[in-house]
Protein backbone atom coordinates (compact mmCIF):
# COMPACT_ATOMS: atom_id res chain seq x y z
CA UNK A 1 0.00 0.00 0.00
CA UNK A 2 1.37 3.42 -0.93
CA UNK A 3 1.90 6.10 1.70
CA UNK A 4 1.79 9.69 0.51
CA UNK A 5 3.21 12.52 2.55
CA UNK A 6 3.13 16.17 1.45
CA UNK A 7 6.01 18.09 3.03
CA UNK A 8 7.91 21.31 2.49
CA UNK A 9 10.63 21.21 -0.13
CA UNK A 10 13.96 20.21 1.45
CA UNK A 11 15.93 23.24 0.37
CA UNK A 12 13.17 25.62 1.45
CA UNK A 13 13.02 23.90 4.83
CA UNK A 14 16.42 25.38 5.61
CA UNK A 15 14.96 28.87 5.38
CA UNK A 16 11.22 28.52 5.90
CA UNK A 17 10.41 25.48 7.96
CA UNK A 18 12.64 26.53 10.82
CA UNK A 19 10.32 29.43 11.48
CA UNK A 20 7.46 27.07 12.11
CA UNK A 21 9.53 24.84 14.37
CA UNK A 22 11.23 27.60 16.33
CA UNK A 23 10.30 27.73 19.98
CA UNK A 24 10.87 30.61 22.36
CA UNK A 25 11.22 30.96 26.11
CA UNK A 26 9.37 33.69 27.98
CA UNK A 27 11.20 37.01 28.15
CA UNK A 28 12.87 38.31 31.32
CA UNK A 29 14.16 41.69 32.39
CA UNK A 30 17.96 41.88 32.56
CA UNK A 31 19.75 44.67 34.42
CA UNK A 32 23.35 45.80 34.33
CA UNK A 33 25.51 46.08 37.44
CA UNK A 34 24.82 49.82 37.77
CA UNK A 35 21.06 49.32 37.73
CA UNK A 36 20.59 52.08 35.16
CA UNK A 37 20.17 49.89 32.09
CA UNK A 38 17.45 47.30 31.68
CA UNK A 39 16.42 45.18 28.68
CA UNK A 40 13.64 42.67 28.13
CA UNK A 41 15.03 39.61 26.40
CA UNK A 42 14.87 35.82 26.30
CA UNK A 43 17.66 33.61 27.59
CA UNK A 44 19.27 31.87 24.60
CA UNK A 45 22.30 30.15 26.11
CA UNK A 46 25.78 30.62 27.53
CA UNK A 47 29.09 31.21 25.77
CA UNK A 48 31.90 30.88 28.25
CA UNK A 49 31.46 33.62 30.86
CA UNK A 50 28.82 35.47 28.82
CA UNK A 51 25.08 35.04 28.56
CA UNK A 52 23.40 35.10 25.13
CA UNK A 53 20.12 37.02 25.04
CA UNK A 54 17.52 37.28 22.29
CA UNK A 55 15.83 40.69 22.20
CA UNK A 56 12.26 41.31 21.04
CA UNK A 57 13.50 42.42 17.60
CA UNK A 58 15.12 39.01 17.10
CA UNK A 59 18.69 40.21 17.58
CA UNK A 60 21.06 38.09 19.68
CA UNK A 61 23.46 39.88 22.03
CA UNK A 62 26.27 38.46 24.18
CA UNK A 63 26.69 40.09 27.61
CA UNK A 64 29.56 39.27 30.01
CA UNK A 65 28.19 38.00 33.33
CA UNK A 66 30.43 40.43 35.20
CA UNK A 67 28.47 43.35 33.69
CA UNK A 68 25.12 42.07 34.99
CA UNK A 69 23.54 42.79 38.33
CA UNK A 70 23.58 40.08 41.01
CA UNK A 71 19.89 39.38 40.33
CA UNK A 72 20.49 39.00 36.58
CA UNK A 73 23.50 36.75 37.16
CA UNK A 74 21.35 34.55 39.38
CA UNK A 75 18.64 34.57 36.70
CA UNK A 76 21.19 33.46 34.11
CA UNK A 77 22.28 30.65 36.41
CA UNK A 78 18.68 29.45 36.83
CA UNK A 79 17.93 29.66 33.11
CA UNK A 80 21.15 27.78 32.31
CA UNK A 81 20.28 25.02 34.77
CA UNK A 82 16.77 24.76 33.34
CA UNK A 83 18.07 24.67 29.77
CA UNK A 84 20.30 21.71 30.56
CA UNK A 85 17.27 19.67 31.52
CA UNK A 86 14.66 20.92 29.07
CA UNK A 87 15.69 23.52 26.48
CA UNK A 88 18.09 21.29 24.60
CA UNK A 89 15.79 18.28 24.33
CA UNK A 90 14.63 17.43 20.81
CA UNK A 91 12.13 19.96 19.50
CA UNK A 92 10.22 17.20 17.71
CA UNK A 93 8.61 14.04 19.17
CA UNK A 94 11.10 11.31 19.98
CA UNK A 95 10.93 8.55 17.40
CA UNK A 96 10.56 4.88 18.45
CA UNK A 97 13.69 2.85 19.15
CA UNK A 98 15.47 2.19 15.89
CA UNK A 99 18.82 1.03 14.60
CA UNK A 100 21.07 3.99 13.91
CA UNK A 101 24.51 4.90 12.65
CA UNK A 102 24.82 8.14 14.61
CA UNK A 103 23.87 8.97 18.17
CA UNK A 104 24.56 12.67 18.15
CA UNK A 105 25.91 15.21 15.71
CA UNK A 106 26.92 17.81 18.32
CA UNK A 107 30.65 17.10 18.07
CA UNK A 108 33.06 19.86 19.06
CA UNK A 109 35.99 20.53 16.72
CA UNK A 110 38.88 22.26 18.44
CA UNK A 111 39.93 25.41 16.62
CA UNK A 112 43.44 26.77 16.65
CA UNK A 113 42.42 30.06 15.05
CA UNK A 114 41.57 33.30 16.78
CA UNK A 115 39.95 36.32 15.14
CA UNK A 116 40.48 40.03 15.58
CA UNK A 117 36.71 40.53 15.84
CA UNK A 118 33.88 39.00 17.86
CA UNK A 119 32.79 36.01 15.80
CA UNK A 120 29.01 35.65 15.39
CA UNK A 121 27.55 33.54 18.20
CA UNK A 122 25.25 30.78 16.93
CA UNK A 123 21.97 30.40 18.85
CA UNK A 124 21.74 26.97 20.53
CA UNK A 125 19.82 24.15 18.87
CA UNK A 126 18.57 20.85 20.32
CA UNK A 127 20.77 17.77 19.86
CA UNK A 128 20.27 15.79 16.68
CA UNK A 129 18.44 12.50 17.18
CA UNK A 130 19.72 9.15 15.90
CA UNK A 131 19.28 8.79 12.15
CA UNK A 132 16.80 5.98 11.41
CA UNK A 133 17.88 3.31 8.94
CA UNK A 134 16.00 0.48 7.25
CA UNK A 135 12.75 2.50 7.23
CA UNK A 136 10.42 3.67 4.46
CA UNK A 137 11.31 6.48 2.08
CA UNK A 138 8.54 8.63 3.56
CA UNK A 139 9.87 8.08 7.08
CA UNK A 140 13.41 8.91 5.97
CA UNK A 141 12.38 12.14 4.25
CA UNK A 142 10.13 13.14 7.14
CA UNK A 143 12.97 12.60 9.62
CA UNK A 144 15.30 14.75 7.52
CA UNK A 145 12.64 17.45 7.38
CA UNK A 146 12.17 17.39 11.15
CA UNK A 147 15.88 17.62 11.88
CA UNK A 148 16.40 20.46 9.42
CA UNK A 149 13.54 22.24 11.17
CA UNK A 150 15.34 21.71 14.47
CA UNK A 151 18.55 23.30 13.12
CA UNK A 152 20.52 20.36 11.74
CA UNK A 153 21.26 20.71 8.01
CA UNK A 154 24.07 18.18 8.54
CA UNK A 155 21.39 15.48 8.75
CA UNK A 156 21.73 15.15 4.96
CA UNK A 157 25.21 13.68 5.50
CA UNK A 158 23.73 10.83 7.50
CA UNK A 159 21.43 9.87 4.64
CA UNK A 160 24.61 8.76 2.87
CA UNK A 161 25.29 5.00 3.30
CA UNK A 162 27.45 4.25 6.32
CA UNK A 163 30.10 2.49 4.22
CA UNK A 164 30.72 5.65 2.18
CA UNK A 165 30.88 7.82 5.28
CA UNK A 166 33.41 5.50 6.86
CA UNK A 167 35.62 5.74 3.77
CA UNK A 168 35.33 9.53 3.77
CA UNK A 169 36.24 9.64 7.47
CA UNK A 170 39.22 7.28 7.16
CA UNK A 171 42.76 8.51 7.70
CA UNK A 172 43.72 7.34 4.21
CA UNK A 173 40.98 9.45 2.64
CA UNK A 174 42.07 12.49 4.68
CA UNK A 175 45.60 12.03 3.42
CA UNK A 176 44.34 11.90 -0.17
CA UNK A 177 42.39 15.13 0.36
CA UNK A 178 45.37 16.85 1.99
CA UNK A 179 47.53 15.93 -1.01
CA UNK A 180 45.04 17.65 -3.33
CA UNK A 181 44.75 20.85 -1.28
CA UNK A 182 45.45 23.95 -3.36
CA UNK A 183 48.24 26.29 -2.15
CA UNK A 184 45.96 29.34 -2.31
CA UNK A 185 43.40 28.02 0.23
CA UNK A 186 44.83 30.12 3.07
CA UNK A 187 44.72 33.30 0.98
CA UNK A 188 41.13 32.65 -0.06
CA UNK A 189 40.12 31.87 3.50
CA UNK A 190 41.74 35.09 4.75
CA UNK A 191 39.77 37.00 2.13
CA UNK A 192 36.42 35.53 3.22
CA UNK A 193 37.11 35.88 6.95
CA UNK A 194 38.42 39.40 6.41
CA UNK A 195 35.22 40.37 4.62
CA UNK A 196 33.14 39.00 7.48
CA UNK A 197 35.36 40.91 9.90
CA UNK A 198 34.46 44.15 8.14
CA UNK A 199 30.75 43.30 8.18
CA UNK A 200 30.93 42.55 11.92
CA UNK A 201 33.13 45.40 13.14
CA UNK A 202 31.80 48.07 10.78
CA UNK A 203 28.13 47.10 10.88
CA UNK A 204 26.89 50.63 11.62
CA UNK A 205 29.03 52.09 8.85
CA UNK A 206 27.80 49.45 6.39
CA UNK A 207 24.15 50.10 7.21
CA UNK A 208 24.63 53.86 6.95
CA UNK A 209 26.85 53.78 3.86
CA UNK A 210 25.96 55.84 0.83
CA UNK A 211 26.13 52.70 -1.29
CA UNK A 212 23.32 51.08 0.65
CA UNK A 213 21.39 54.36 0.64
CA UNK A 214 21.38 54.26 -3.18
CA UNK A 215 19.56 50.90 -3.24
CA UNK A 216 15.73 50.59 -3.24
CA UNK A 217 14.18 51.07 0.25
CA UNK A 218 12.72 47.52 0.36
CA UNK A 219 16.21 46.13 -0.21
CA UNK A 220 17.63 48.33 2.56
CA UNK A 221 14.97 47.00 4.92
CA UNK A 222 15.84 43.40 4.06
CA UNK A 223 19.55 44.04 4.63
CA UNK A 224 18.90 45.52 8.07
CA UNK A 225 16.43 42.80 9.00
CA UNK A 226 18.58 39.82 8.01
CA UNK A 227 22.04 41.31 8.58
CA UNK A 228 23.16 39.54 11.75
CA UNK A 229 21.95 35.98 11.07
CA UNK A 230 23.11 36.18 7.44
CA UNK A 231 26.61 37.14 8.61
CA UNK A 232 26.48 34.25 11.07
CA UNK A 233 25.60 31.79 8.32
CA UNK A 234 28.35 33.18 6.07
CA UNK A 235 30.93 32.91 8.86
CA UNK A 236 30.14 29.27 9.64
CA UNK A 237 29.96 28.28 5.97
CA UNK A 238 33.39 29.86 5.43
CA UNK A 239 34.70 27.91 8.41
CA UNK A 240 33.27 24.71 6.96
CA UNK A 241 34.62 25.22 3.44
CA UNK A 242 37.98 26.65 4.50
CA UNK A 243 38.68 25.08 7.92
CA UNK A 244 41.64 26.23 9.95
CA UNK A 245 42.27 22.69 11.19
CA UNK A 246 44.62 20.44 9.30
CA UNK A 247 42.50 18.30 6.97
CA UNK A 248 44.31 15.15 8.07
CA UNK A 249 43.30 15.55 11.73
CA UNK A 250 39.54 16.16 11.45
CA UNK A 251 37.11 13.88 9.66
CA UNK A 252 34.32 14.89 7.31
CA UNK A 253 31.72 13.81 9.86
CA UNK A 254 33.40 15.87 12.59
CA UNK A 255 33.31 18.96 10.36
CA UNK A 256 29.63 18.51 9.58
CA UNK A 257 28.78 17.66 13.19
CA UNK A 258 30.48 20.82 14.45
CA UNK A 259 29.43 23.37 11.86
CA UNK A 260 26.01 21.96 10.94
CA UNK A 261 24.25 22.91 14.22
CA UNK A 262 25.99 26.28 14.20
CA UNK A 263 24.79 27.02 10.67
CA UNK A 264 21.37 25.71 11.67
CA UNK A 265 21.21 28.03 14.68
CA UNK A 266 21.90 31.10 12.55
CA UNK A 267 19.40 29.89 9.94
CA UNK A 268 16.71 29.63 12.59
CA UNK A 269 17.36 33.23 13.61
CA UNK A 270 17.28 34.29 9.96
CA UNK A 271 14.02 32.51 9.22
CA UNK A 272 12.30 34.00 12.26
CA UNK A 273 12.66 37.42 10.61
CA UNK A 274 10.86 36.53 7.40
CA UNK A 275 7.88 38.88 6.89
CA UNK A 276 4.31 37.53 7.04
CA UNK A 277 3.35 35.80 3.81
CA UNK A 278 6.91 34.99 2.84
CA UNK A 279 6.53 31.38 3.99
CA UNK A 280 3.64 30.83 1.61
CA UNK A 281 5.57 32.41 -1.26
CA UNK A 282 8.64 30.23 -0.73
CA UNK A 283 7.02 26.94 0.16
CA UNK A 284 6.37 24.43 -2.57
CA UNK A 285 4.79 21.01 -2.23
CA UNK A 286 6.91 17.92 -2.25
CA UNK A 287 5.22 14.52 -2.40
CA UNK A 288 6.89 11.34 -1.21
CA UNK A 289 5.40 7.98 -2.25
CA UNK A 290 6.48 4.52 -1.14
CA UNK A 291 5.55 2.31 -4.12
CA UNK A 292 6.66 -0.79 -2.21
CA UNK A 293 9.27 -1.73 0.38
CA UNK A 294 12.24 -1.00 -1.90
CA UNK A 295 11.01 1.57 -4.42
CA UNK A 296 9.65 5.09 -4.06
CA UNK A 297 9.35 8.49 -5.72
CA UNK A 298 9.81 12.09 -4.71
CA UNK A 299 7.87 14.61 -6.79
CA UNK A 300 7.76 18.38 -6.62
CA UNK A 301 5.98 20.88 -8.79
CA UNK A 302 8.01 23.72 -10.26
CA UNK A 303 6.67 27.31 -10.34
CA UNK A 304 5.74 26.81 -14.00
CA UNK A 305 3.53 23.86 -13.05
CA UNK A 306 5.89 21.22 -14.41
CA UNK A 307 6.38 18.21 -12.15
CA UNK A 308 9.83 16.77 -11.57
CA UNK A 309 10.01 13.17 -10.41
CA UNK A 310 12.94 11.46 -8.67
CA UNK A 311 12.88 7.69 -8.41
CA UNK A 312 14.70 6.04 -5.54
CA UNK A 313 15.62 2.47 -4.65
CA UNK A 314 16.42 1.05 -1.25
CA UNK A 315 19.79 -0.70 -1.30
CA UNK A 316 20.45 -2.43 2.00
CA UNK A 317 19.22 0.07 4.58
CA UNK A 318 19.55 3.29 2.57
CA UNK A 319 17.56 5.07 -0.12
CA UNK A 320 19.47 6.17 -3.25
CA UNK A 321 18.48 7.61 -6.64
CA UNK A 322 17.99 4.78 -9.12
CA UNK A 323 21.18 5.47 -11.10
CA UNK A 324 23.31 5.63 -7.97
CA UNK A 325 21.60 2.57 -6.55
CA UNK A 326 22.65 0.58 -9.63
CA UNK A 327 26.27 1.73 -9.33
CA UNK A 328 26.20 1.11 -5.59
CA UNK A 329 25.00 -2.46 -6.05
CA UNK A 330 27.73 -3.12 -8.61
CA UNK A 331 30.64 -1.61 -6.65
CA UNK A 332 29.67 -2.06 -3.01
CA UNK A 333 32.22 -4.82 -2.42
CA UNK A 334 35.21 -2.79 -3.63
CA UNK A 335 34.37 0.80 -2.70
CA UNK A 336 37.78 1.47 -1.18
CA UNK A 337 39.61 0.26 -4.27
CA UNK A 338 37.43 2.46 -6.49
CA UNK A 339 38.01 5.50 -4.26
CA UNK A 340 41.78 4.91 -4.25
CA UNK A 341 41.81 4.59 -8.04
CA UNK A 342 39.86 7.83 -8.43
CA UNK A 343 42.24 9.72 -6.15
CA UNK A 344 45.23 8.38 -8.04
CA UNK A 345 43.66 9.51 -11.29
CA UNK A 346 43.06 12.98 -9.86
CA UNK A 347 46.67 13.20 -8.69
CA UNK A 348 47.87 12.11 -12.12
CA UNK A 349 45.73 14.72 -13.86
CA UNK A 350 46.98 17.37 -11.44
CA UNK A 351 50.59 16.47 -12.21
CA UNK A 352 49.95 16.47 -15.97
CA UNK A 353 48.40 19.94 -15.78
CA UNK A 354 50.89 21.32 -13.27
CA UNK A 355 51.78 24.35 -15.39
CA UNK A 356 48.18 25.38 -15.98
CA UNK A 357 47.04 24.72 -12.41
CA UNK A 358 50.11 26.47 -11.05
CA UNK A 359 49.29 29.57 -13.09
CA UNK A 360 45.67 29.51 -11.91
CA UNK A 361 46.72 28.99 -8.29
CA UNK A 362 49.08 31.94 -8.47
CA UNK A 363 46.44 34.12 -10.12
CA UNK A 364 43.70 33.24 -7.63
CA UNK A 365 46.07 33.58 -4.70
CA UNK A 366 47.18 36.99 -5.95
CA UNK A 367 43.61 38.19 -6.40
CA UNK A 368 42.66 36.95 -2.92
CA UNK A 369 45.67 38.71 -1.39
CA UNK A 370 44.85 41.97 -3.20
CA UNK A 371 41.24 41.83 -2.02
CA UNK A 372 42.42 41.15 1.54
CA UNK A 373 44.49 44.34 1.40
CA UNK A 374 41.43 46.26 0.19
CA UNK A 375 39.43 44.83 3.08
CA UNK A 376 42.06 45.99 5.57
CA UNK A 377 41.54 49.59 4.44
CA UNK A 378 37.87 49.33 5.38
CA UNK A 379 38.78 48.07 8.87
CA UNK A 380 40.94 51.15 9.45
CA UNK A 381 38.03 53.59 8.94
CA UNK A 382 36.99 55.32 12.18
CA UNK A 383 34.20 57.57 10.85
CA UNK A 384 31.36 57.18 8.38
CA UNK A 385 33.07 59.56 5.97
CA UNK A 386 36.29 57.57 6.11
CA UNK A 387 34.41 54.33 5.59
CA UNK A 388 32.48 55.64 2.58
CA UNK A 389 35.70 56.94 1.05
CA UNK A 390 37.47 53.65 1.72
CA UNK A 391 34.53 51.78 0.22
CA UNK A 392 34.65 53.93 -2.90
CA UNK A 393 38.39 53.36 -3.23
CA UNK A 394 37.84 49.65 -2.60
CA UNK A 395 35.27 49.55 -5.38
CA UNK A 396 37.72 51.16 -7.79
CA UNK A 397 40.42 48.71 -6.75
CA UNK A 398 38.10 45.73 -7.09
CA UNK A 399 37.14 46.88 -10.56
CA UNK A 400 40.81 46.60 -11.51
CA UNK A 401 41.29 43.20 -9.85
CA UNK A 402 38.07 41.44 -10.76
CA UNK A 403 36.26 40.99 -14.07
CA UNK A 404 34.12 43.84 -15.35
CA UNK A 405 31.03 44.51 -13.25
CA UNK A 406 32.24 42.66 -10.17
CA UNK A 407 32.73 45.71 -7.97
CA UNK A 408 30.21 47.39 -5.67
CA UNK A 409 27.28 48.69 -7.76
CA UNK A 410 27.07 52.44 -8.21
Image (cartoon, grey):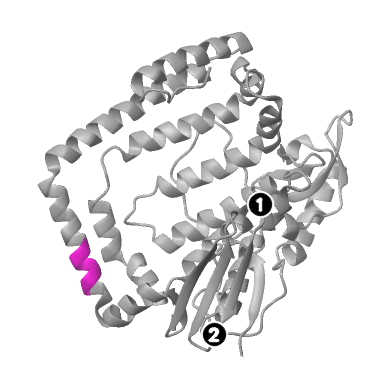
Q: Residue at x 54, y 56 (%)?
A: 260
Q: Of helix, strand and loop, which one carries label 1?
A: helix
Mark 2 or mark 1, earlier in chain: 1
Residue 374 x, y percent position in the rendering: 43, 20
Residue 266 x, y percent position in the rendering: 63, 48
Whether residue 182 is situated above or below residue 289 in the rendered picture = above
Whether residue 284 is situated above or below residue 380 in the rendered picture = below
Residue 225 x, y percent position in the rendering: 71, 35
Residue 346 placement, left or right of 368: left
Q: Which mark is residue 392?
A: none
Magenta-drawn stretch, dominant element (helix, strand or loop): helix
Say whether residue 70 is magenta.
no
Q: Which residues are magenta?
A: 337-342
Q: Of helix, strand and loop, which one carries label 2?
A: loop
Residue 174 x, y percent position in the rendering: 30, 60
Whether residue 332 is situated above or below residue 32 in the rendered picture = below
Question: Dot 1 corresponds to which residue?
Answer: 282
Q: Nearer the viewer, residue 322 or 226?
A: 322
How many numbered discs? 2
Is the residue marked by circle 1 packed among few (<14), some (14-19), or many (20+) residues within 10 Å? few
Q: Nearer the viewer, residue 249 or 229?
A: 229
Q: Is there a contact, CB below 8 Å, between mark 2 and mark 1?
A: no
Quadrant of residue 87 within the rendered picture: bottom right
Say whether residue 341 is magenta.
yes
Q: Residue at x 57, y 38 (%)?
A: 119
Question: Dot 2 corresponds to which residue?
Answer: 291
Can you name the residue that lies furthest to the left here?
A: 352
Amino acid sequence: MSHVYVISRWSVCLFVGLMIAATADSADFWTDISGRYKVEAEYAGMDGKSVILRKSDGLFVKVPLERLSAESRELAKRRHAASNSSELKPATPTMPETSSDVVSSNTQVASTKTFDFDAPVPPPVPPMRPFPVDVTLAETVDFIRQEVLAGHPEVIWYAVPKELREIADSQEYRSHIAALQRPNNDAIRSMFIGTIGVLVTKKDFVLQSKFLAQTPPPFQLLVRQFYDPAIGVAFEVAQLIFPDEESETVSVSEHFNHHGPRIGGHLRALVERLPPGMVEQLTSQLTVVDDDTTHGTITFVKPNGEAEVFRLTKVGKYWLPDDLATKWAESRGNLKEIADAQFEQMKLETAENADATGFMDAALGGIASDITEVIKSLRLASTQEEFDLALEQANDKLSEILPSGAGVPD
